[in-house]
Amino acid sequence: MTEATIQRIAVVTGASRGIGEATARALAADGHHVVMLARSVPAMEAIAQQIASNGGQAEALEADITDHAGLAATIEGIAQKHGRLDILVNNAGITRDNLMLRMSDEEFDQVIHANLRSVFITCRAALRPMMRGKWGRIINVGSVAGVAGNAGQANYAAAKAGLAGMTKSLAKEMAAKNITANLVAPGFVETSMTEKLPDTIKELARKATPLGRFGQPEEIAAAIAFLAGERAGFITGQVLAVDGGMTMA
Ligand code: NAP
């Protein structure tokens, strides 16, 4: 098989809804075999069935980004079962918003643990199989909050900014192994994460976005799928804002 015809094994965390679901669908449409991870297995199974009925390949596995030993074992198990692991999309994430003045130690620690440490765990577990395959694509999902900060999200912004530093370090360490690592930093996107925001905040977000609207999950997934593909082989260590222009310099 040539490089272009190898079927890649792609792992997507947080694939049960929102940006992760759209990413799983986009990667499957590109011909990759997608392993979907999240806690909501029935939701992922329904998505996997739809992917299969469109001619794609996907499977659903239960995983919790707060259980780091379990998460590492899951990644290792996927690589073992398929004999390879080519693409890793670290998309799952949580928020525990509060002004710093009121933020508890727990709120800070939970977000760092779930959004930053978990990504270190999955990346480390994926590196050996990617090195064996002499090819790899790691795409971490950050946020405009990690680039510009956001009131009420010191914990989340710290985790997402941490992901940028981690991704760039990984990109430098792994470049010689033909493994790229990039961060996609979405702006405000219509998902269950933003649904719960008060209308006043949504309006402020819309006003702060030059394109004047929220993004759709598919618009973030398109950027992730591009970075996961053959054609993005010369792009590494980058932070790609997909934010309707919100953070342009
Ligand atoms: P979402 O709709 O809330 O979906 C979150 C996903 O993460 C779900 O699939 C959820 O699955 C999974 N997840 C949450 N806690 C988990 C846990 N403990 N273990 C395993 N999986 C867990 O969020 P989204 O808006 O699509 O966001 C996806 C990513 O984009 C996140 O990293 C987020 O920070 C980032 N982002 C989003 C926006 C936005 O405006 N929406 C903006 C910037 C960045 P289960 O509940 O089934 O486990």
Image (cartoon, helix red, strand yellow):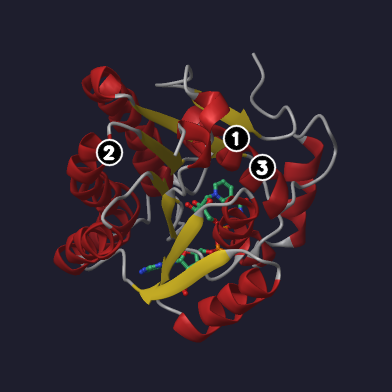
Can residue 100 be seen here? no
- Residue at which label 3 appears: 222
Depth order, front residue of 22/192: 22
Question: Residue reaching furthest front?
Answer: 1
Depth order, front residue of 34/14: 34
- Residue at which label 1 appears: 226
Three-letter amino acid code of the residue under disc 1: Phe
Q: Bin the neighbour count of mark 3 within 10 Å (Cα to Cα): few under 14, some 14-19, many 20 and up.
A: some
Left or right of 119 on screen, residue 161: right
142 above or below 90?
Answer: above
Q: Earlier in the sequence, mark 3 or mark 2?
A: 2
Distance from disc 2 to disc 1, alpha carbons, whole Å, reads: 20 Å
Question: Residue reaching furthest bottom?
Answer: 42
Residue at image location 30% in from the left, 60% down from the top: 82
Of tags 3 and 2, the one toward the viewer is 2
Indicate the quadrant containing the C terminus: top left, top right, bottom left or bottom right: top right
- Spot occupied by residue 16 in the image (x, y as percentages of width and height): 53, 71
- Spot occupied by residue 130 in the image (x, y as percentages of width and height): 27, 40
Q: Quadrant of residue 108?
A: bottom left
- Spot occupied by residue 37 in the image (x, y as percentages of width and height): 41, 67
* Dot 2 beta carbon under 8 Å from ligand 1: no
- Residue at which label 2 appears: 133
Q: Give the total number of marks visible in the rendering.
A: 3
Q: Earlier in the sequence, mark 2 or mark 1?
A: 2
Left or right of 119 on screen, residue 194: right
Three-letter amino acid code of the residue under disc 3: Ala
Q: Secondary structure at mark 2?
A: helix
Question: Residue reaching furthest left?
Answer: 69
Distance from disc 3 to disc 2, alpha carbons, whole Å, reads: 24 Å
Three-letter amino acid code of the residue under disc 2: Gly
Residue contact at pointers 3 and 1, CB within 8 angstroms: yes
Residue at image location 63% in from the left, 67% down from the top: 192
